[in-house]
Image (cartoon, rainbow, N blue to C red):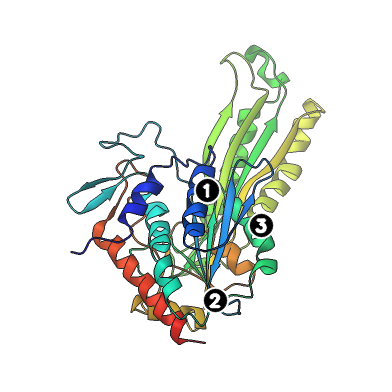
Amino acid sequence: MSEPRSRALLATLVGFATVSRDSNLALIEFVRDYLEGLGVACELIHNAERTKANLLASIGPAVAGGIVLSGHTDVVPVDGQPWTVEPFSLTERDGKLYGRGTADMKGYLASVLAAVPRFLASPLRRPVHLAFSYDEEVGCLGVRGLLAVLPQRIPPPALCLIGEPTGLKPVLGHKGKFAMRCHVHGAPCHSAYAPDGVNAIEQAARLIGRLGEIGQRLAAPEHHDGRFDPAFSTVQVGLIQGGTALNIVPADCRFDFEVRALPAFEPQAVVDELQTYAERELLPAMQAVKADTAIRFEPLSAYPGLATDPHSAAAQCLAHLCGSDAFGTVAFGTEGGLFAAAGIPTVVCGPGSMEQGHKPDEFVSVEQLAACDRLMDRLAEYLSNHA
């Protein structure tokens, strides 16, 4: 097995602890310096606080029809996970490269960067654009600033390739995500006089029960899309907090819920139904006891699903690069839906598996990394032979 040319770059990238709660600037500035050292101009697109940045760079002629290679630089935390290796240092063992982000998704970023000399040496007839973002893991936040300026920076691309881990299998779709927080404000009192108060936890439980009913309806066979697993949109409550003591009727309760929505389903419909239920069924009785009781909904994060047409030029290009038209979908979300919403046909393909992503002892295999390097070579050939 040949040594992946991207291995050294992967070791460097893993060494930057770019957990979403922290800055990614050290990594981004390394990438900028690496690219500029090769003669590639870069632009950094910072957040408002200038603590994080996206990076955009182009190689090849300034013409339409290029391919965007998109990936996120942030990783999930390692706190509390039982790692057997140092998470922010690359460790090779039994043909596997261990470290936080190796699969999700610094392996892909390293492969893209290692291919830059090949892109520069190739007679590209269409450009390749590098688009590295921040804060994907907390709601695809950073890429929105990049997409806002992209039409002014590059000619319209033909394709965006998101390098999330798919085992290098061609993927055309994933669900969207819509996350909300519900705040319930009740009326506290001593538990001996519970009927005189409004129990915020009980009201939250009623709302959660309604979410369960909505989820059951969405799981009905008529709503299924067999391309996805699960084949239907899902609703789940992941966090809840409320109350101060057992002998006090709780004044406040809040819970967070999410909708994992099929591309054709509008998740706002779940929130609308829940809000209507709150206003018509719960609030009148609550406010009859205490006028200032309330139920409030707060958006947390959202990104759209992705469903690229398998007969599209973008899909056929991906099939050519992968050597396979066995298109699939993934259960996790990506920035792909945002690129597609911006009018850029988008596909997903990258080294490694999300079975390892976010877990202790995350890894990408040496074989997968080398295969991604070869995919980049095919991309250089493709862009050199297709006007």
Residue 34 spot, x, y in % from top left: 46, 55
Q: What amino acid is labelled 2 in the image?
A: Gly
> Looking at numbered disc 3 in the image, what kind of residue is underneath it?
Ala
* Rendering coords of residue 100 (x, y %): 37, 44
Name the one closer to the observer, 43 or 345: 43
Could you say whether the residue bearing mark 1 is in a helix, strand or loop?
helix
**Which residue is rendered at x = 51% and y = 61% of the image?**
175
Is disc 3 surrounded by few (<14), some (14 to 19) or many (20+) residues within 10 Å? few
Report the mark closest to the observer, 2 or 3. 2
As rendered, which of 44 and 139 lies closer to the eye? Answer: 44
Q: Which residue is under mark 2?
A: 66
Tell me if mark 2 has few (under 14), some (14-19) or many (20+) residues whose alpha carbon lies within 10 angstroms of its own.
many
Above/below status of 204 relative to 32: above
Q: Nearer the viewer, residue 204 or 59?
A: 59
- Secondary structure at badge 2 equals loop
- Packing grade of label 1 (10 A; few <14, some 14-19, many >=20) is some
Work out whether mark 2 precedes mark 1 in sequence or the reverse, and give the earlier one: 1
Label 3 vs 1, first from the N-terminus: 1
The quadrant holding residue 49 is top right
* Depth check, front residue: 252 or 6: 6
Q: Residue at x 42, y 74 (%)?
A: 121
Q: Is residue 56 left or right of residue 321?
A: right
**Residue 275 visible in the shown view:** yes
Tell me which residue sits at (45%, 82%) in the image.
384
* Residue at which label 1 appears: 29
Residue receiving disc 3: 269
Judged left or right of residue 286, residue 5 is left
* Discs 2, 1 touching: Cβ within 8 Å: no
